[in-house]
Image: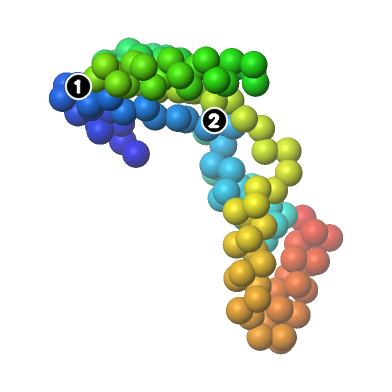
Amino acid sequence: MTCMEMVTAAREKLGIAYFVFNDGELSQISQSQQITYNRKTSTAIGKMNWEGLAETVGAKYLEIGKNEELTSIIENSIDLSASGIPVIVGVDIEYGKRTRFTSGVVKTVSGKFSASAKLRFAGRIIKRRITG
């Protein structure tokens, strides 16, 4: 995503709501790297100013800061987008454990390996865990 579609949405008055699930990193890639290599490389995004981005592209910004705000913020974003205003909704999240997506990918991919490939792969993981 380059955000230029947001500029187009604002210019054309397309009421699109963008929900940005922000945890400060590319989580799916990060989790995959952690499983395979026992480390994360180049996946940290850092703090983004989503409100500044919204202002820059001509959208409104809303933020879900706690669970109690979920319904009202979603309803507000629907109302704004229905009136032709693009909306960026910031949702701060924390992946303290692997997502179902990551777990499913690992299960599916590893299921396609032959027994010898699984053994070789497991050996590499164990070696990386021990040696870092």
Give the vertical position of 29 relative to 124 (above or below): above
Assess disc 2: are there few (<14), some (14-19) or many (≥20) residues with their C-alpha within 10 Å of its C-alpha: some
Total labels: the figure holds: 2
Residue type, mark 1 in image: Lys
Horizontal side of residue 127 vs 113, given as left or right: right
Residue type, mark 2 in image: Asn
State how far apart marks 1 and 2 are (Cα).
26 Å
Mark 1, residue position? 13
Residue found farthest to the left: 12
Measuring from the top left, give residue 26's x and y in whole percent. 54, 42
Q: Secondary structure at mark 1?
A: loop
Q: Secondary structure at mark 2?
A: strand
* Residue located at (60% from left, 62% from top): 105
Give the vertical position of 7 relative to 123 (above or below): above
Assess disc 1: are there few (<14), some (14-19) or many (≥20) residues with their C-alpha within 10 Å of its C-alpha: some
Q: Quadrant of residue 91?
A: top right
Question: Depth check: 25 or 99 in front?
Answer: 99
* Residue located at (25% from left, 31% from top): 4
Measuring from the top left, give residue 50's x and y in whole percent. 43, 20
Give the vertical position of 115 relative to 45 (above or below): below
Sooner in the amino-acid sequence: mark 1 or mark 2: 1
Image quarter in which the C terminus is found: bottom right
Q: Quadrant of residue 68?
A: top right
Mark 2, residue position? 22
* Residue located at (64% from left, 80% from top): 113
Question: Depth check: 100 or 23 in front?
Answer: 100
Regarding residue 98, the answer to whether it shows in the image is: yes
Measuring from the top left, give residue 62's x and y in whole percent. 45, 15
Measuring from the top left, give residue 128's x and y in whole percent. 75, 62
